[in-house]
Image: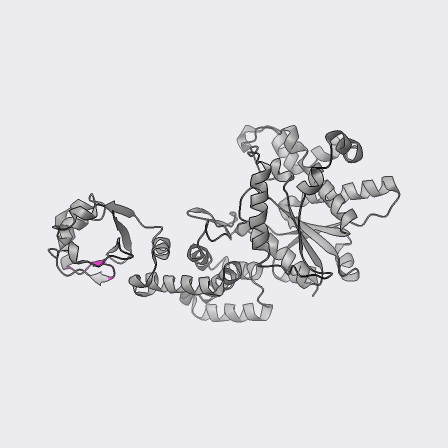
Amino acid sequence: MNLIEELTWRGMYHDSMPGTAEHLATNAPITGYIGFDPTAASLHIGNLATIMLLVHLQRAGHRPVALVGGATGMIGDPSGKSVERNLLDETTLRHNQAGIQAQLEKFLDFSEGPTGALVVNNYDWFKEIGFLGFLREVGKHLTVNYMMAKDSVKRRISGNEDSGADGLSYTEFSYQLLQGYDFVHLNKTLGCTLQMGASDQWGNITTGTELIRRVANAEGTEAKAYALTGQLITKADGTKYGKSETGTVWLDATMTSPYQFYQFFLNSADADAPRLIRVFTLLSKEEIEAIEAEHAAAPHLRTLQKALAADVTTRVHSAAATEAAIAASQVLFGGGDLASLDEATLLDVFAGVPHLRVLRAEMTELNTATFLSDFTLHKIFPSKGEARKMIQSGGVSINREKVTSPDAPVAALQHLAGKYLVVQKGKKNYFLVELV
């Protein structure tokens, strides 16, 4: 497989240094790496696009290396940031590294051999380097003029209030020098000749290739270092991809549940889905085009989004998690049995609806109309009269059962997972009532 051709038809390729294509074609297997920021215990959707660069590198017959920035994570990359980030301690960073490696193992083959993946942590070599030694052996090779020419530095150092910039500390200014040295170290110890990343990392990546060139010139050796960047994943309207209404979409099931993860992709806009299925899945061009043709024939069935969501959820979580997410979706949108959901899934399904808590002990004497208005603090119906009127017109359901009488006792209702009632008002208004 030709790596650049594969990335290009998938819409993932952005740029590369001259000679990169030839180097990939004539020196297989090469070793290439991408750096990951360990400031969280999990990677997220934005990182997944970058992981896929490593996946395709390995599929093309090369060796992928994932560098977890335990050292650089203590400083923070200024690229795309307007303020300096909080610094993390080594214990936290080591914990985060372990979580990240476990996630990478779902995508990359770590078996022995010339193309087996590796995870490395740059703290392991930086902890042995003293400040003066680093300045003498590394810092002398790059000028301040070269470092200040980078866009990420220029934007921050200007202190432009309109952009939210607050200047640039020396700590962050040194980031590109540290990341550049990562490439030097991997080049010498692993024979790594390629660094990849998202397009906003071009400045940091080329600092590495330039540092390798200058160190090689000083030592009288030959420099082999190349760079390749992938497209940033954005929505059709140009906004950043990877956020949901509730925040970042994480790859860790305890931070973003499989159901929420599945729904995130399932809810992709028609304008975005064709690109997303190329970036986030390993389906072939022919398979994707066949799915797109089926989708075009009946867009309301969302065939493209379903294929995308199922594929990615299975690889990030599991086939069983995908099946459970699909079943939960069918319960919500297809009229399935709510009682079949466990408590965690029930809360996931109704995460976006008003969640009301009421005292169980005070419900024994209530009728349905009073419960839906007064007892829920008028948040479902503003009055008992309106509740009665809508019940009598057949517009109210509790736990998917149509309420036929405003005077029916609430105490007779079955509780989901022992303590929940799902109230549906009209066709689209849901409320989750928890009995406490």
User: Measuring 25% from the left and 59% from the top, which residue is drawn there?
Assistant: 399
Residue sitting nearer the eye, 215 or 363: 363
- Residue 323 at x, y = what percent? 43, 65
Does the stretch in magenta take in 395? yes
Q: In front: 81, or 215?
A: 215
Give the quarter of the image for residue 38. Answer: top right
Query: Residue 420 in the image: x percent, y percent?
Result: 27, 53
Location of the N terminus (image quadrant): bottom right
The residues colored magenta run 393-400
Q: Residue furthest right?
A: 220
| Image position of 56 (left or right of 373) | right
Q: Is residue 357 visible?
A: yes
Position in image of residue 361 (x %, y %): 18, 47
Magenta residues, dominant SS class: loop
Q: Is residue 163 above or below residue 231?
A: above
Magenta run includes residue 8: no
Q: Is residue 191 above or below residue 283?
A: above
Measured along the vertical axis of the image, is residue 76 above or below residue 332?
A: above
The residue under the point 65% across, 44% down is 201
Q: Is residue 382 visible?
A: no
Q: Nearer the viewer, residue 193 or 240?
A: 193
Q: Exactly how many numbered labels are in the figure?
A: 0
Location of residue 373 in the rendering, given as x and y in whole percent from the top left corner: 17, 47
Q: How is the image coloured?
A: one colour
Is 339 drawn above or below residue 73 in the view shown?
below
From the viewer's perspective, tell me whether residue 296 is left or right of residue 52. Answer: left
Q: Answer with left or right where residue 218 lies relative to residue 249.
A: right
Quadrant of the image occupied by residue 210: top right
